[in-house]
Image (cartoon, rainbow, N blue to C red):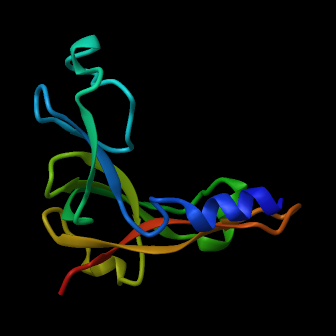
């Protein structure tokens, strides 16, 4: 378990949203990948990391009432499709907001929060979530 926690502490992506950009077609992908899905082998050697602002807007959302076991304690929670300012559309949980305040088109920004805790090992997993911008 020591190696896993050291890996997490030293991770380049720990508190940042890091994507990959293809210099061949200028597309940005999140999460990062080794080869551009559009350019395929022409992208080899032309992919580089780029940090995302973590800001975007809600494209669609749903309120989850019947959650998987690992997320039961968070019910009800909001899961949204978010179009990031840099281009990619990702799925993210919206936290710290009244469900009545949510609307398609509202601006959000990312925050890093506890996602879940592994019951057997006790390892807490953190990841990105989103809050409404004011």
Side of 119 where 90 appears, left or right? left
Res 93 → quadrant:
bottom left
Q: Is residue 34 left or right of residue 126?
A: left
Counting labels gives: 0
- What's the residue at 25%, 80% (across, down)? 101
User: 125 or 34: which is nearer to us?
Assistant: 34
User: From this viewpoint, which residue is outermost toward the top?
Assistant: 41
Furthest toward the right, the residue is 120
Furthest-front residue in this view: 45
Quadrant of image for the C terminus: bottom left
Q: Specify the quadrant that holds the N terminus.
A: bottom right
Q: x, y percentage for residue 60?
A: 25, 54
Which quadrant would residue 23 be assigned to in this image? top left
Residue at the image position 70 percent from the left and 59 percent from the top: 70
Q: Residue at x 26, y 73 (%)?
A: 109
- Pinpoint residue 62: horizontal percent, then vertical percent: 37, 58
Q: Is residue 58 left or right of residue 6?
A: left
Quarter of the rendering containing residue 52? bottom left
Give the residue displayed 39% in from the left and 29% down from the top.
Answer: 34
Instruction: Please tell me whether residue 107 is drawn above or below residue 47 in the rendered image.
Output: below
**134 above or below 18?**
below
Relative to 8, say whether 37 is above or below: above
Q: Where is residue 108 in the image (x, y as percent from the top left)?
A: 24, 71
The foreground one among 77 and 14 is 14
């Amino acid at each position: 378990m020591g190696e896993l926690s050291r890996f997490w502490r030293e991770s380049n992506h720990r508190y940042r949203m890091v994507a990959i950009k293809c210099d061949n077609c200028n597309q940005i992908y999140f999460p990062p990948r080794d080869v551009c899905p559009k350019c395929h082998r022409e992208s080899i050697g032309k992919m580089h990391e780029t940090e995302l602002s973590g800001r975007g807007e809600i494209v669609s959302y749903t309120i989850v009432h019947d959650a998987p076991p690992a997320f039961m304690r968070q019910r009800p929670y909001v899961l949204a499709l978010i179009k990031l300012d840099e281009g990619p559309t990702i799925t993210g949980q919206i936290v710290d907001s009244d469900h009545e305040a949510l609307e398609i088109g509202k601006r959000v920004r990312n925050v890093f929060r506890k996602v879940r805790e592994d019951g057997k090992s006790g390892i807490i997993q953190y990841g990105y979530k989103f809050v409404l911008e004011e």
